[in-house]
Image: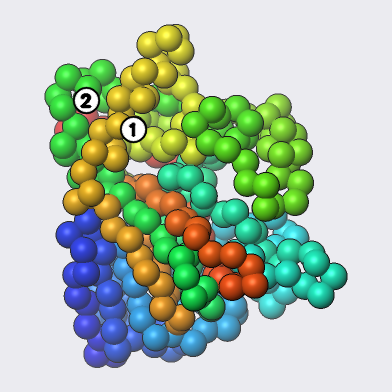
Amino acid sequence: MTFAVKEISPAGAAEITGFDCRVPTGAADLARLKQAFLDWPILCIRDQRLTPKQQATFARQWGALERQDRSTYCHPDDPDVLILSNERRADGSQVGIVDAGDFWHSDSSHIGEPCRMTMLYSVKNPDKGGDTHFINMYQVLDALPDALKQRVAGRNAIHHVAKTLNPRVTISAEREGAADYYKSREKATKPVSQPIVRTHPETGRQALYISPRFTIAIEDMDDREAQPLLDDLFRHMFSNPAWQYTHKWRDGDLVFWDNACLNHMAGGGYEYPDTRRMHRTTIVGDRPFYRAA
Ligand SMILES: [Fe+2]
């Protein structure tokens, strides 16, 4: 296939045109795409027309797909495809997850082996809003003052899925049963320890691997010291817009990103009946690790 890769943001985003995800990707093309993914951790393939099965088939070329744990919102045509949407059925029930990704995070860092990459296929965009924001955590770490870096390199942070344990986030009133769901996760889900500085498994580069959404503490550090330290790290993370990229979706975009070196967040800003619908697939990943540079 003849396709073009063009950088669209120095924060690590590129767009790909002239590519058809419905056609099995040849070995040379897949190698080229995989290299592009290491060079730009946010890739957008434009102008796709994908059924859920086609999306899952394309995604499996990159690795095994994660089983989705919220089966209510899995696509009926392929259980590995999760629906993110604010659409409602005639009876008022929700079609997909309505508040997905409403705070900065790296996908599934609250589990031991977080997903390597996330693919979102844009089926329908709202007239207004619905952007996705990214921060390049390689660049965040590269600019971290040495004194701060020395305090965190080689240390681990605690990540947890329960929003009710995290004063830095709030629970959307839009999603039915969300408060009860997160309350039930407090004890049912074990906290997970992750390196604060993460070495990328393929590029070998280091990135800051924390997020306001999932990081709630630092291992073996009293909260009186750990919380101000996390505040400092988060302040630094948001201190330079040049490390950020905002994706303004077009219908038919397939965007995939590298969770080992990014944070991202759904921007919101749209309201039913102005609808947004995305289909999500995630590729399994490995245990994050730190290796001294
Ligand atoms: Fe996410």
Query: Which residue is located at x 37 percent, y 24 percent?
Result: 230
Q: Say above or below: 266 vs 232.
A: below
Reading the image, the residue beneath label 2 is 149
- Which is more toward the observer, 168 or 269? 269
User: Is the CB of the residue bearing disc 2 within 8 angstroms of ligand 1?
Assistant: no
First of labels 2, 1 by sequence position: 2
Residue at the disc numbered 1: 234
The amino acid pointed to by label 2 is Lys
Q: Residues within 10 Å of mark 2 (few under 14, many from 20)?
A: some
Q: For the point 25% across and 33% down, which residue is it?
A: 236
Task: Give residue 35's position: percent from left, percent from top.
Answer: 24, 66
141 lies above or below 201: above
Q: Give the Cα distance between marks 2 and 1.
A: 13 Å
Q: Quadrant of the N terminus?
A: bottom left
When the figure is inspected, residue 223 is found, relative to residue 244, above or below; the finding is above
Across and down, in percent, residue 81 comes to: 61, 68
Q: Quick check: can you spot residue 259? A: no
Whole-percent x, y for residue 146 in the image: 14, 24
